[in-house]
Amino acid sequence: MRIQERAAQFTAANQVRQLGIYPYFRPIDSDQDTEVIINNHRVLMLGSNNYLGLTNHPEVKSAAKAAIDRYGSGCAGSRFLNGTLRIHIELEEELADFVHKEAALLYSTGFQVNQGVISTLVGRDGAVVIDRTDHASIIDGCRLAFGRTVKFEHSDIDALERVLKSLNSLTPFIVIDGVFSMEGDIAPLPDIVRLAGQYNADVMVDDAHSIGVLGPNGEGTAAHFGLTEGVGLIMGTFSKSLASIGGFIAGDAAVIDFLKHHSRALIFSASPAPASVASVQAALKIIKREPERRAKLWANTRRLWNNLKSAGISYGRSQTPIVPILIGDDLDTFRVCAHLQEEGVFVNPVVSPAVGPGEALIRLAIMATHTFDQIDYAVEKIKLVLKKLGIQSKG
C-alpha cells in the first residue's frame, strides 16, 4: 500500500472534527500558567504537566536568556562530537547529586531517554519486564532492544513474580513508571525491588511525573520509598516540574559511560539547546530552595480529590497530582472536553490506544500555583458538564 493510500484510509480525526469536538493541537497564545489564552478567551489550565509552576518563573526565563547570550541558540551537533557545552556537564553533575546517583547523562527529549537506554542495555541474553501501562517511550525502547519483552498486569506483584520465574536463563531488566501518567497512581516499588533482589534483576524507574513531586526533596519515587540503593537507574524528564524540554538517566558511573559510547539516541541526536539546559538548572535550584511549592502542590491535589469526592465524581486510583476521571466512551470523552473548554476549563482527553477500549478518560493535572478558588471552580464546571451530557463518571 502506498503512503498516500494509507493516509487516505485514516478518517477518524476528520469524523471528530465534523462533530465539532476535535480536542487536539489547540493553539495557546500565552505562557503555561494556571490560566491560558485560547481563541482570545481566558481558560483555566488543568491539562499542563507544569506541576511546580516554574515554566514562567522569572529566574528560569532569565537563565534561558543568559544562556542564549553566552552560547547561542543551539549546539549544531551531537554531544558525542562538537555539541557538549560546560553547562551540559554541570547539569549532569547536579542531577546525579539530586537523585543520589554517581553520574547522569542528558538526552534531547525524555522520549529518547527511554528509547535510547532500553535499546542499548538489553541484549539477546536479556528480557525487559514492563508494566502493561508503562509509557509509550518505554514500549518503543523495548521494540528496538534485541532481547525479549514481557509485560505484566498493572501493578500486579504476583503477575510480576510469575514473569520473573518464567524467564529461565534470560537476565531480567524491570522498567516501570514511578507515577503512571494516565492513572496517577504510584508504582509498588518496595515489592518490585524485593522481587528484583530475589530474581537478580536490574530496575529502572521512569520518574517523568515524579521528579519535583515525590520524595523528601522532590527526588522521585525511589527516594519517596527510601529505596534509592535498590534502583539501578533513574530516568527523568525536563518537560514537567523542571520547566524545559529534554531528559536524563542517572545511575552507576560505569553504566552511564557505556551509554555515552553506545546509545544511538544520544550519539546521533542534536545536543540539548543551551536555553533548555540553563532553564533546568534554574528550576532545580528553585525546587531545592522552595519546598513550600511541593507542599502547596499536595495541598491543591488533596483539595481536588476532596471536591470530586463530595461531588460524587470518581477519580480512580489517583495518588498524585495526576487525576483521571473515567468516562468510558471515546466520543463522550471528546464531548466532555469540548464542553469544558466552552465553560472555561482546559482538560486533556485520553482515549484508546493510550488506554484500553472503553477506558477513555479526561486527565486533570494540578499545579502548585493553582488557587483553591480555581480548583473549586473547575470541579463545579466538571459536575455541570457531566450532568448536562448525562454522563456518570465510572468508579
Image (cartoon, rainbow, N blue to C red):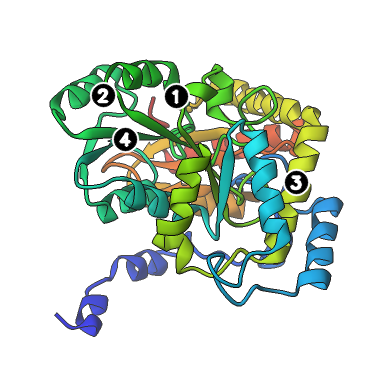
Q: Nearer the viewer, mark 1 or mark 3?
A: 3
Is the residue marked by circle 2 packed among few (<14), some (14-19), or many (20+) residues within 10 Å?
many
Which SS class for mark 3?
A: helix
Type of residue at label 1? Answer: Arg
Could you give the CA–CA distance between mark 4 and mark 3, rounded to whole angstroms?
A: 31 Å
- First in sequence: mark 2 vs mark 3: 2
Residue 261 appears at what percent x and percent y? 44, 58
Residue 296 in sight here: yes
> Label for residue 283?
3
Type of residue at label 4? Answer: Phe
Which SS class for mark 4?
A: strand
> Label for residue 160?
2
Q: Are marks 4 and 3 in contact (CB under 8 Å)?
A: no
Type of residue at label 2? Answer: Leu
Mark 1 — residue?
A: 317
> Label for residue 237?
none
Which SS class for mark 2?
A: helix
Residue 169 appears at what percent x and percent y? 15, 31
**Rendered residue at 39%/34% (across/down):** 176
Mark 4 — residue?
A: 173
The relative height of residue 269 versus residue 185 in the rendered view (above or below) is: below
Is the residue marked by circle 1 packed among few (<14), some (14-19), or many (20+) residues within 10 Å?
few
**Rendered residue at 56%/50% (across/down):** 105
Q: Nearer the viewer, mark 1 or mark 2?
A: 2
Q: Are marks 1 and 2 in contact (CB under 8 Å)?
A: no
Residue 286 figure quarter: top right
Could you give the CA–CA distance between mark 1 and mark 3, rounded to whole angstroms?
A: 29 Å
* Quarter in which the N terminus is drawn: bottom left
Q: Nearer the viewer, mark 2 or mark 4?
A: 4
